[in-house]
Image (cartoon, helix red, strand yellow):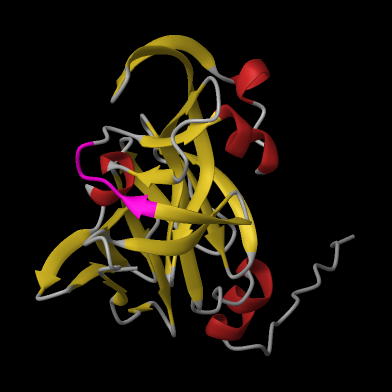
Amino acid sequence: MKKRVRVFRWNLPVAALLTTVLGTPASAVERVKVMALFSDKAMVEIDGKQRFLRAGQRTSEGVLLISANPREAVMEVDGRRETYPLGASYGGNFTEIKAREVRISRNTHGAFVTLGSINGRSTEMLVDTGATSIAMSEVEAKRLGISYRLQGTRSRVRTASGFADAYQVTLASVQVGDIELINVDGVVVKGNSPGQVLLGMSFLQRVNMDVQGSVLVLSRQP
């Protein structure tokens, strides 16, 4: 007795079948922000969601981290491979946002002073190209809620009055106008000096500076 073999016929087109099995392609990434960078690792925010990536890892949104160092990352987004510096932010179907710019006028003493924020808290800042890092007094650090004793490293720094005990710290965020940088080196000096936060080179070297008469212009590609 012969066995009857049933033959099943698929009426779906091959493309439709593959779409059903593999899923639809991921939608285009709308916004990416580089939050933190390390050797072959990066913290990025993709459409509002934070992702920690290692080199060679791809997110569910399709963002691939190719390589990274503390200054920049090479990523592939929506099929495009580009280099993105720390703090960079891109949006609008991954079209780069226009450069951010801050204009600071000289005060009556000839100094550039502006309001900014550290870790989300407002503070007055004096632009000081002679300061290696963002420097502040112990008093100001306490007001800003910086846990310098627990998270900082003891050190000695040279001040206008000589050497002083201090703590080296990493500031989670520093913002001046529309320019915000992540993971900025800072120093907390024991005592109540300096009287203002010194906006030093750990911030300034990561932006473009241009003096136009009595105005200092800070700018940065986001």
Query: In the depicted view, which residue is nearer to us: 119 or 195?
Result: 195
Q: Is residue 26 above or below residue 34?
A: below
Point out residue 48 in the picture as x, y percentages from the top left corner: 63, 67
Q: Main secondary structure of the magenta part?
A: loop
- With 200 as the anchor, is 62 left or right in this view? right
Q: Quadrant of residue 150?
A: top right
Query: In the depicted view, which residue is nearer to us: 19 or 86?
Result: 86
Q: Quadrant of residue 117?
A: bottom right
Residue at position x 53%, y 19% from top? 190
Query: In the depicted view, which residue is nearer to us: 178 or 64?
Result: 178
Residue at position x 41%, y 13% from top? 164
Q: Which residues are magenta?
A: 126-130
- With 33 as the anchor, is 111 left or right in this view? left
Point out residue 82 in the picture as x, y percentages from the top left corner: 25, 61
Q: Is residue 15 above or below residue 71?
A: below
- With 192 as the anchor, is 96 left or right in this view? left
Furthest-right residue in this view: 1
